[in-house]
Image: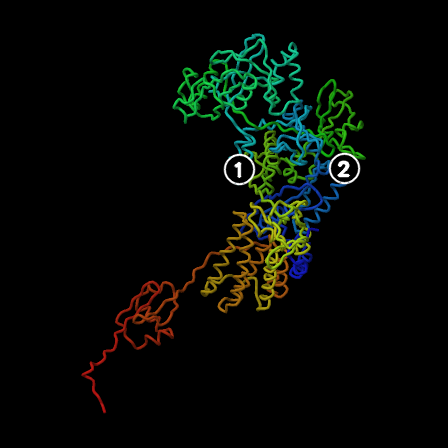
Amino acid sequence: MASPSAGVSRSRINALSKRLIKLGEKWKTTTLNGPALSIDNINLVRHRPERMYILSMFPYPSGNLHMGHLRVYVISDSLNRFYRQRGHKVIHPMGWDAFGLPAENAAIERGIHPNTWTRTNIKAMKEQMNNMLGNFDWDREITTCDPEYYKFTQWIFLKLFENGLAYRKEGEINWDPVDKTVLANEQVDINGRSWRSGALVQKKLLNQWYLGITKFSKELRNDLNYLKKWPSKVKAMQRNWIGQSERANIKFDTTEEFLPSIWVSTTRAETIFSVQYVVLSLKHPISQHFTKSEKALQEFIRKCPTLPEDTKEGFLLPGIKAINPITKEAVPIFVAPYVVEPFDADKKEVGAAVMGVPAHDKRDFAFWNKNMPNEPIISCVQPIEIMDGSVEVGSEISLPFESSEGILTSVAGSFAGMYTERARNEITALLKSKNQGNFEVKYRLRDWLISRQRYWGAPIPIIYCDNCGAVPVPEKDLPVLLPDVKELSGKGGNPLSKIPEFIDTKCPSCGGDARRETDTMDTFIDSSWYYFRYLDPHNSTLPFNYEKASEGMPVDIYIGGVEHAVLHLLYSRFITKFLNSINAVDLSKTNAEPFHYLVTQGMVHGKTFVDPQTGRFLKPEEVEEKDSGVIMKTTGAAPLISYEKMSKSKYNGADPNACIAMHGPDATRAHILFQSPIEDVLRWDEEKIVGVERWLQRVIKLSQDFSAFGTFTSDFATPEDMNEEEVKFHNDMQKYLGSVTKSFEKYLSLNTVISDYMKITNLIENAKNKEKVSKELLMLNLRKFISILYPIVPSITEEAAEIIKSSQSGLKNWNHYEWPHIEKVTEWKYKHYQVVINGRVKFIYTDEKDLFKKGREYVYERLLLDTEGKKYLANRTYDKMILKYNVISFVFKKKKMPKQDERKIYF
């Protein structure tokens, strides 16, 4: 159990939380499985029961929920309950991303089977989800390591194979030396380390299975434009990963007619006038041709794997040159390891080539200086900013001009003086007209490497036959079951390759002896289609029913971390588009996109204490809070305090189970939403939860107070004739009800929902003490308030509703699960008028708003009916009456006083 934050008294927290904890326990069953979660319980007159698919990314069953999990599931469950209250048919499922290296490594460390480890953890995590009152459709539960599930993961693989999108080839792969498996490019970070183990990735040659995601490059990139409700940063990450560049393919013939032409691809066709060499990959056909006769080349290729990754070493091919298709000049040809082999399986060429432009590319510049140090560098593009001639064409330069924009020099012949963008297009067009080149749009995206040399994954359903080659397992024989193993060591290569009874089989095509594929699939395949399976989880013949999937997709709201932007989200989009393309589902109305609204919640950071002298992370029990602030117990000095990503090594983690046990589920749920907007980093501070607890206790007290006020009935409605105080109270309530509804439905601003809850609490408490606000109107709005609390604090709603119903027989049939109707803002029918006599305000008079429209005499007569009006106006004749704004002004003549000399004096 994680320790509470520094300076927080456990006994004080328990004293505040005791009742809330009991309420969570009391209402746990009802809040998880109660009538509110049935569509039949909601009044559907006002709201059409539309389908709503709300999904949080399913977890790997590690055994314990962390605060990041809790945040995601509280968000999704709150939305689930809200939309159910609104009358929607909500799908809110949960499952387990159960295959993969973590389970296998954990099993190896503990000496148990991965399946045992996984099942135990699933049971524990389900209980933890129940403790936080997460309502999920458990009848739709899926587990990716169940044969009933991975049977259809294999089915999808076979469909990809059938359509030419699953293929095997030898290639240079990323090898994780710690986890001892292959990694896709997306699983290697910018520092060359494994996304999971953190090990420096090694390069190896291996026969591997790939999925042809590049066939969908254009759709995957262009359709990002339709994802209006995805975060811009996620779309930018995918757009950059897929990449797109307009390139020119240029053909260089060689001086040896019996050898094939050399094709290069470039984004800068205008620099063809500065080409000074061509360099080939190690496996290019011309390279391979020369290895037969050039022992020096053989030796060079043999040593290439030992060279640094950024090596500039090259081998000059003797007796052959490449012909520039524009200038017709012959340039040398090198072989070098820096030229990457082509990746696409459908490419006919075996190798790749690059045109070397030392004047306009850093890498080419370094390679030329290394291999031809005494040769001049030819520049054909001048930067626009130095057109004063300070750089002479053809002169020796120390650094290449890399910018893609400039003006071509006289070296470019008829293109001299032309801006690079125009020259680029016209040169490519010229090459195309001569059959020496063409335009092409290229993408950075590479096909998806799915082979894994580990045990705990779905077996690849392929059989190898010496006569028939790679043969797919017939669909009727699916699933290819993962064989049981007694012990896993994590050493000695692929575990399945050591199980003869698994490997040895018969060819489905010819019946001869054959052997099974022993690689398992990347677990990202499991998670690339699971949202379809939720819609039809018990289908034993297909992954999902066509109609159910077509009607149920896309996911309306998908919630998960931004760290999945390139991996899971990109793969899911690919598989969805593929399934749509083979008519397994019809999602044409959404461009075959699986997720309509993507919500990427921020990470949860914990309060972190560091010794300023040693830099050592401090445990919470090593510090204490004084009046002057937090100090270290050993020295009394102040530690460095920050909020950082939670981790065991920093002692800044918080256990969701411990938090729920100390504060109850409702306070925990409200606190985690109140602390931060969904998309921002959440700085977890358990000390502040006391404010939420006190607020929840005030809500319960309101229910108790109002239950004792009198007798109420459920048929009471907002009266048309309300006094001024009631109108103000009513209008404020409608404002907050509208704000809460929009925060759920439109803005997904759940922290402001809690803020509005608290404002409503204050509003009702204040109105309760005003005599002019009727108790019936207060009770009506208290009931509405209790109903809108349900998505976030369901136990509080249940308890408050029970308090009211148990003491008010007239409210026993009140459906506290229905989302309240937001009424129109009401204007008070009356108005306050200042009555002014001879320039002085005498009293305030209240009457109808359009009083002035009925004329002065009417106003005067109305005033005479008022007590104050009689006092000041009766038996008097005014000289002038002015009606303006909210002022009624009278002018009376003053009584004339006799002059001093006219007065009679009596003695």
**Frontmost residue, 738 versus 503:** 503
- Furthest-top residue in this view: 257
**Frontmost residue, 759 versus 9:** 9
Secondary structure under the numbered disc 1 in the rendered image: loop
Q: Residue 721: where, in percent of width, then height?
A: 45, 64
Residue 41 seen: no
**Frontmost residue, 609 versus 645:** 609
Q: Quadrant of residue 149?
A: top right
Q: Residue 685: where, in percent of width, then height?
A: 61, 52
Type of amino acid under label 2: Ile
Disc sitting over residue 227 in the figure: 1
Q: Residue 779: where, in percent of width, then height?
A: 55, 63
Q: CA distance from mark 1 to mark 2?
A: 42 Å
Type of amino acid under label 1: Leu
Label 2: which residue?
Answer: 108
Is 588 rendered above or below residue 698? Answer: above
Residue at 25 percent across and 78 percent down: it is 895
Is 771 rendered above or below residue 758? Answer: below
